[in-house]
Image: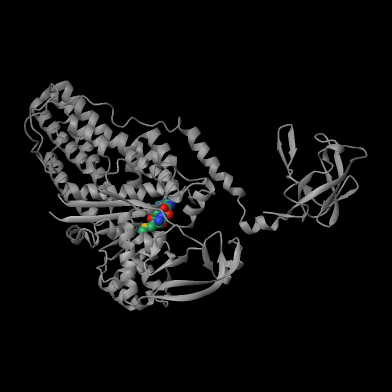
Amino acid sequence: MKNFYLTTPIYYVNDKPHIGHAYTTILADVIARFHRNAGDKVLFLTGLDEHGQKVQQAAKDRNIKPKEHCDDMAPSFLDLWEKLHINYDDFIRTTEKRHETVVKNILQKVYDSGDIYEDVYEGLYSVSEERFITDKEAESGEFRDIKKLKEKNYFFKMSNYQERLIDYIKSNPKFIQPEHRKNEVLGFLNQPLADLCISRPKTRLNWGIDLPFDSSYVTYVWFDALINYITAPGFNANNKKFDSYWPADYHLIGKDILTTHAVYWPTMLMSAELPLPKNIFAHGWWLSGESKMSKSLGNVVDPLDLIEEYGVDPVRYYLMREMVLGQDASFTLESFIKCYNSDLANDFGNLLSRVTNLLKKFFDSRIPLGEDQSIRGKAIKDGGIYAIERVWKLIYDMRVNEAIEEILKYIRSVNKYMEDMAPWKLVKTDINKAGEVLYNASEALRISSNLLKPIMPKRTLSVLKTLNAEKSNLEWGELNSGNKIKEHNQLFPRIDLKKNEKKLIQSQEKESDLVNVITFKEFLDIELKTGKVISAEKVDGAKKLLKLQVQVGSKERQIISGIAEYYSPDDLLGNLIVVVTNLKPAKIFGEESYGMLLAAKKGKDLKLITIDSDKVSSGMQIY
Ligand code: MSP
């Protein structure tokens, strides 16, 4: 028996969990279940990252304490893990005392070894992004609230460990996986490594863990978050447990946090004189169709909706099956339904119903006596034994999608065997032979279900229960002849693609909405200002038009607007409205118009956007 320790990233507590978070956690759960089945003592850790500016701000907006805010948010992750049947061994929250103690301990250790120094940094700072940015970034127009900032902070001498890290990566080829990610990190380490800013003054951020050597600062983000991986197995608290699990076997992460895990974390551990994790595995991203999933694009896939509609196991199966090792994968409802129908309804579900129907009809619902020793029968037995070995090897290499493909290949070969042997015909001429064929097919079904168990724990359990083999092992020949099989529901009813078309269309509509997306810079190109209506009159001969004089700051401008059906001139006088001030002037009904008013319109209703003039004066810029 061996100890096996694997982790997911700890997720930002402020976020709503989506399919990307669900993927990593299911992947870890699947790997953990395989290892438990193989007899390993597993520590599977997941948790929440709860400090930082965003949490502090969100709590402030809600007028509550940050910890209270975290406590309110945490259940959305915990509930999802429960619904997804995630069997973690430890769930860590960075606001726990056990974590704070370890973070302080490591910071002190690194400080004492001379790897932390103070420095003043002066540069451009984006308030919205909470970080210093380069001049080039500032010019890109993608950052808001930029100001010059001069600040004293603490820095970790990451550069001290650059050479050692390069040597380590080169001499431990499995340390960073897959291979192309390792090369990415080595490429990054080709450049001189900058030191890492690890603090924030409390005047700016106080929702964090105090630096043990300067309590006017808190430690910033990564130094806090990464250390969770050693807190959980008991660093400095339970040495026996810690030594039996650390170094971790696997840190599972997404590709976006590769540098922090493959550069920051190992150098921190080197400085603290702790061994490095054995493997860091970076998977790709789930895209929504072809686009990146993001809240602002409104295309985030919510795993709860999917579970509710199609069940947990099919969702787990699809996510594991569809993402190829280390590459991005594209989520669409259509590919989900196609995968479900072909693998689960047609192949796996069909094998179960064929076998159980025949056993019921011709063998009094009992497992028949004897194995099929024919060449075809033996091929099914050998195929099962081979699949067990091969699947485990693939899982060991983190090639979960290939392992699933291997199982499916086996299931398809059993369906083919059934067609070739046609036991429903054989029963008429050679009932014993038909029984032997069905024994092999039932045994193959049991092996396949056991192999799929870590991926679909619930539904495979109902197959194993049907066969009276819940506790059976992954070895050929464990089904007991004479045992009665049980009734079962249809395991994977087909999903009608047509009936789901409406949902498909809705999701496509969401994507096509994105055609209108503009960049932040383009948005800034539109100049919006407040303006006060100082006179308004009808335009002669034009039923729909009003001629307005609008005061924008110190200047007056004339605007012709098609609002006469909705407002009389008197209604408008004195109102503070929103004007597009850099629109190309136009001649409307012979009158010059310098700008446009903003209004909300639906059907026959139109309302001008007006602003409370007590708080805002005319000529103010609107963002
Ligand atoms: N809190 C940090 C991690 C600290 S670990 C010491 C963090 N959190 S996160 O919630 O933003 O992201 C957690 C994980 O979700 C990352 O591994 C990230 O790659 C993953 N995913 C977020 N969106 C994703 C997809 N669309 N697809 C797949 N995984 C993605 O980063």
Whole-percent x, y for residue 263 in the image: 36, 69
Q: Quadrant of ligand 1?
A: bottom left
Camera-side residue of 196 and 344: 196
User: In the displayed structure, would residue 524 be above or below residue 108?
Assistant: above
Camera-side residue of 479 and 111: 111
Residue 456 appears left or right of 66? left
Whole-percent x, y for residue 15 in the image: 45, 49
Q: Measuring 51% from the left and 63% from the top, which residue is drawn there?
A: 203
Quadrant of the frame with the C terminus: bottom right
Q: Measuring 62% from the left and 57% from the top, which residue is drawn there?
A: 520
Whole-percent x, y for residue 371 in the image: 8, 35
Quadrant of the frame with the N terminus: bottom left
Residue 513 appears left or right of 81? right
Whole-percent x, y for residue 591 in the image: 90, 48
User: In the displayed structure, would residue 496 be above or below residue 78?
Assistant: above
User: Does any portion of residue 387 appear in the rendered image?
Assistant: no
Residue 617 appears left or right of 148? right
Q: Measuring 19% from the left and 36% from the top, which residue is drawn there?
A: 445
In which quarter of the view is residue 194 placed? Answer: bottom left
In which quarter of the view is residue 142 placed? Answer: bottom right
